[in-house]
Structure formats: structure tokens, C-alpha cells
Image (spheres, rainbow, N blue to C red):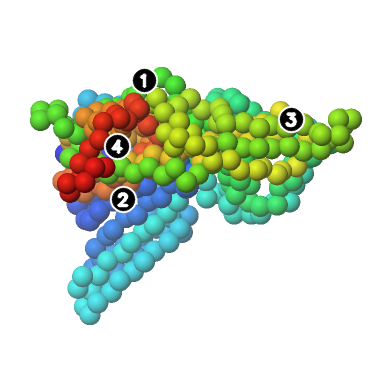
């Protein structure tokens, strides 16, 4: 295995005996859902007549769990930092084949313990997010204020919260065309709160190669695309502050995100699919913002699924980064955004099942005809 991993319980590293006992460890990172962890442990009778691990203080409710992975010759990466929320215990006669599944979520769960009713006035959405993150000792990302909303003033529509803090921020992020999540950085306990627009600029940080006989890093990939989603928005609204009887409009076919390849959704589909957006806003700028957010969510029309072995890739795929796929043809080769990564770690291997997305396809398809079963395509 071209990496090592370390488990931490409430900030203390696990002992060697725990690693020798652990059956499997699974961690899932997701761009728009909480991160999750599952430990699978064999259960037997302990020396004092109890069951091993079932009443272990390290695995009690809301115990802190963290996982750090260290690829060969690379820096350590914390892929999970969260809390125990659930046990599933399976027992058979004599505890033969008895198992315990320990499941938890990332530190955003602490933001879900109390529902709030609060009015936010004279503040932007990103400032709200940063304020809430800071309340929990979570460091706001410096990118949170990029592409920020207009301020919610008392004269217009103030911002009402009727949900837990994390539920409120995730709903707010969706209407902003952003992603909201909490993740650790290189060390457990160093948590960052993200309320960010996807960053599709710059070079890919990892290349996934399928067909190179010497340098392949994945042995199978599955692709699909779906054009049954909007690529244009019509939006208009009357205004109490504007004398124009037609109000203001924000018709757009631009999501505000850079396409990851040559053909965006509208170009690839050949015909636009247009929807009407109705939402209460105070000005044309905010209406445009909401329209772009709708297209941003709909624009991920290409999807790729696969699995990589860390020993072969010698890198850790991380959610919210851009990777490159090579060797799969002109349409599907290119840059992709990492949506989810599910790590399965044992004593012998570290595998990563992943979902990648993108908002564009490659070069325009060839006009030459193909043949399938003796009939023209």
C-alpha cells in the first residue's frame, strides 16, 4: 500500500492493537452533503466479560474521530474530522461472527444541534456564513466572499433563518450557486468552513490515465451525460422602487462558471431548454444572481464514475478540486470537478471510488457516419 493512515480518538492516536483489529475503514467526502465515516470492527468477549468495542469510551456518542492519510513522499492529508453518531451491533450465538459498525458525520453536525429563528439584516450571504462558522470555532475560507450576494437591507427583503445553522447555510448556498461544507485541513481539529463558488480555473492537480499501457492509473471508468436540464432562464419582476411598469428582468444563459471544455450544455444539446424563475428579490442584480445559480446547479450534465488505488495513483483525490482524464477520446477527455470520494481502507489497500462531474463536453462530434449492426448510425 503506497500510503499509511492514522486514526485519532478525541485527539489521541490509535494504538497498534486497534489497527490490527480493525476490519475496514470507510470515509466519504461529498461536495454537497456531510462527510461520513464507518468503522467495521469484530466483536468478541473481553476479559471482564463485556463485549469488545461496544462500550468503548473512544467510540461513545459524539466522540471525536479523525483520519489522516499519508501517501508515499507526500504531505499528510486529513480526510475526516467528525463525531460518532450511530452504532450497529450484529451478534450471533457465542459472539461468532459478531460485528460492530460505527458511523459518524463531519464536524458540521455540531451546527445541527439546535434550530434557530433569527433575522439577518444589512448583511451579505457570505458574511452570514462566516459569522456562523466562527461561532463554532471553524475558520471561514478566504474564498467565501468571492461572488457574494447583495446586502439584505431592512428596507427590502431581510434574511430570515428558521432552521439549524448548517441547514440554513446549505439552503443559502444552493440559491447562491455555491457549496457549503466543513472539512479539516492537514491536521485534525483545524477545520475550515466553505461557502464557495466552484473554482474551475487553473491546472488540474491530478491526472487519471486509462489506456496508457505503462502509466495507467485507473482500470475502468463509466461516463454518462444528460441534457434534460435547463440551459437558459427567463426572470422578471415588478419593483416597488422603480417606476418602470415592466419592472426589471434578468434573462440569461450564463451560469457564471467557466466551462471545463469546448461545448457547454446549450452548445452540446444543440437547442436551449428555457425555464422561468420566480423569486422575490430587491433589484436586477440579485435576480441575475439567482438565475445564474439555477444554471450553475443544472450545468453539471456530464458525470464520470470510477475507482483508483492509492498505490497506483500515489495521490489522494479530494472533493472540490479539478482533475484531468486522459485516453478516453476527444469528447470525454479533459478536466473534471471532483464531486464525491469514498475511501475504503484496509491493512492491505486504500481504494477510492469517485464521482467526477463537468459542465462541458470536448470537441464537436465528427460529422462522419458510423455503422451499428449494418445500419447507419
* Sequence order check, earlier mark of 2 and 4: 2
Marks 1 and 3, how far apart in space?
34 Å
Residue mark closest to the camera, 3 vs 2:
3
* Sequence order check, earlier mark of 4 and 3: 4
Marks 1 and 2, how far apart in space?
29 Å
Residue mark closest to the camera, 4 vs 1:
1
Tell me which residue sits at (41%, 19%) in the image.
Answer: 202
Which residue position holds label 1? 203
- The image's mark for residue 69 is 4
Which residue position holds label 3? 284
Marks 2 and 4, how far apart in space?
12 Å
* Sequence order check, earlier mark of 4 and 1: 4
The percent position of residue 330, horizontal first and vertical second, equals 28, 28
Which residue position holds label 2? 26
- Residue lying furthest left: 213
* Dot 3: element: helix
Corner quadrant of residue 123 = top right
* Dot 1: element: loop
- Crowd around label 3: few <14 · some 14–19 · many ≥20 (10 Å): some
Residue mark closest to the camera, 1 vs 3:
3
Does residue 314 show up?
A: no
Marks 4 and 1, how far apart in space?
24 Å
Viewer-side residue, 342 vs 249:
249
Amino acid at each position: 500500500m503506497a500510503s499509511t493512515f492514522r486514526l485519532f480518538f478525541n485527539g489521541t492516536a490509535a494504538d497498534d492493537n486497534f489497527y490490527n483489529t480493525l476490519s475496514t475503514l470507510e470515509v466519504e467526502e461529498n461536495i454537497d452533503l456531510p462527510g461520513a465515516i464507518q468503522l467495521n470492527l469484530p466483536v468478541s468477549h473481553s476479559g471482564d466479560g463485556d463485549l469488545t468495542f461496544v462500550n468503548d469510551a473512544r467510540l461513545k456518542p459524539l466522540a471525536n474521530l479523525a483520519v489522516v492519510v499519508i501517501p508515499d513522499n507526500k504531505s499528510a492529508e486529513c480526510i475526516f474530522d467528525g463525531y460518532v453518531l450511530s452504532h450497529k451491533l450484529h451478534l450471533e450465538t457465542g459472539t461468532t461472527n459478531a460485528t460492530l459498525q460505527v458511523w459518524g458525520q463531519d464536524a458540521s453536525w455540531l451546527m445541527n444541534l439546535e434550530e434557530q429563528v433569527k433575522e439577518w439584516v444589512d448583511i451579505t450571504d457570505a458574511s452570514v456564513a462566516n459569522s456562523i462558522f466562527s461561532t463554532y470555532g471553524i475558520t471561514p475560507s478566504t474564498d467565501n466572499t468571492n461572488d457574494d450576494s447583495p446586502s439584505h437591507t431592512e428596507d427590502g427583503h431581510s434574511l430570515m433563518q428558521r432552521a439549524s445553522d448548517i441547514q440554513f447555510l446549505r439552503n443559502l448556498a444552493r440559491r447562491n450557486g455555491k457549496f457549503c461544507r466543513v472539512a479539516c485541513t492537514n491536521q485534525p481539529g483545524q477545520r475550515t468552513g466553505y461557502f464557495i463558488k466552484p473554482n474551475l480555473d487553473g491546472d488540474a492537480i491530478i491526472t487519471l490515465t486509462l489506456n496508457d499501457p505503462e502509466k495507467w492509473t485507473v482500470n475502468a471508468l463509466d461516463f454518462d451525460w444528460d441534457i434534460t436540464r435547463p440551459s437558459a432562464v427567463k426572470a422578471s419582476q415588478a419593483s416597488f422602487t422603480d417606476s418602470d411598469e415592466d419592472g426589471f428582468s434578468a434573462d440569461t444563459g450564463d451560469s457564471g462558471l467557466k466551462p471545463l471544455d469546448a461545448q457547454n450544455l446549450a452548445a452540446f444539446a444543440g437547442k436551449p431548454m428555457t425555464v422561468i424563475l420566480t423569486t422575490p428579490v430587491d433589484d436586477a442584480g440579485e435576480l441575475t444572481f439567482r438565475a445564474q445559480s439555477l444554471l450553475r446547479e443544472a450545468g453539471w450534465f456530464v458525470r464520470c464514475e470510477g475507482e483508483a488505488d492509492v498505490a497506483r495513483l500515489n495521490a489522494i483525490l479530494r472533493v472540490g478540486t479539478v482533475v484531468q482524464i486522459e485516453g478516453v477520446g476527444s469528447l470525454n477527455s479533459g478536466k473534471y470537478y471532483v464531486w464525491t470520494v469514498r475511501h475504503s481502507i484496509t491493512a492491505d489497500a486504500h481504494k477510492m471510488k469517485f464521482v467526477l462531474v463537468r459542465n462541458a463536453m470536448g470537441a464537436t462530434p465528427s460529422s462522419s457516419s458510423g455503422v451499428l449492426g449494418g445500419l447507419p448510425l
